[in-house]
Amino acid sequence: MARDEVLKQNWEQLEAQLTADFGGGEVLNLDAIIYLIGVQEFGRPQKKFKKDDKVNLMHIAICKLLEPYGYYEFDYFDEQGWPHYQIKAKLPHLKPGEQSVLMKEAIVHYFIENKYLKTEKSVSNEVE
């Protein structure tokens, strides 16, 4: 099966699973899933977040998701418990569709690594 088809199947399975577990009746889109990852990585899911915090949570998620690809590296936690990352490599210029594919691939890899998504087929062999 082609890599793109495997990613599509894994993404659809993950999206359905996350929507069932966290969607409250609404389908979770890419941004909502990135936000969930940020909340998970921050480690305080019960906290009420301000708008600025939500942007920061999404940034944390993106850094965490792109860390295995060599773009970011965890640096430290600040006094409020927020994780900080260093830029290791400049992100390549990608078209919007390519950005979406990269993020979906990274998200699928994240949830497989965290044993949330169980799948027979993996596209994560590029991230090693």
Image: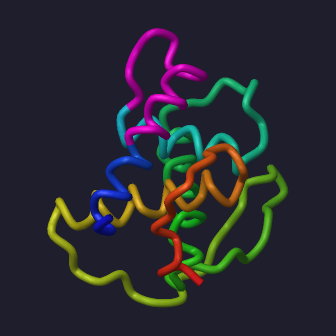
Residue 24 magenta-drawn?
A: yes
50 in relation to 54, above or below: above
Residue occupying image coordinates x 49% and y 40%? 14
Rendering coords of residue 58 (x, y %): 50, 49
What residue do we see at 15% from left, 69% from top? 95
In reply to whether residue 13 is colored magenta, the answer given is yes
Q: Is 41 or 116 nearer to us in this picture? A: 116
Where does residue 52 sit, x and y in percent of width and height? 50, 41
Position of residue 74 in the picture relative to residue 33 (left or right): right
* x and y percentages locating residue 81 in the rendered image: 81, 52
Furthest-front residue in view?
A: 1
> Going by the picture, which residue comes out furthest to the right?
79
Side of 108 where 37 appears, left or right:
right
Residue drawn where x is 59% and y is 84% of the image: 128
Horizontally, residue 105 falls left or right of residue 1, namely right
Quadrant of residue 13 within the rendered picture: top left
Tell me where residue 3 sits by quadrant: bottom left
Identify the magenta region. Answer: 12-28
What colour scheme was applied to this rendering of the protein? rainbow
Q: Quadrant of the N terminus?
A: bottom left
Q: Nearer the viewer, residue 19 or 12?
A: 12
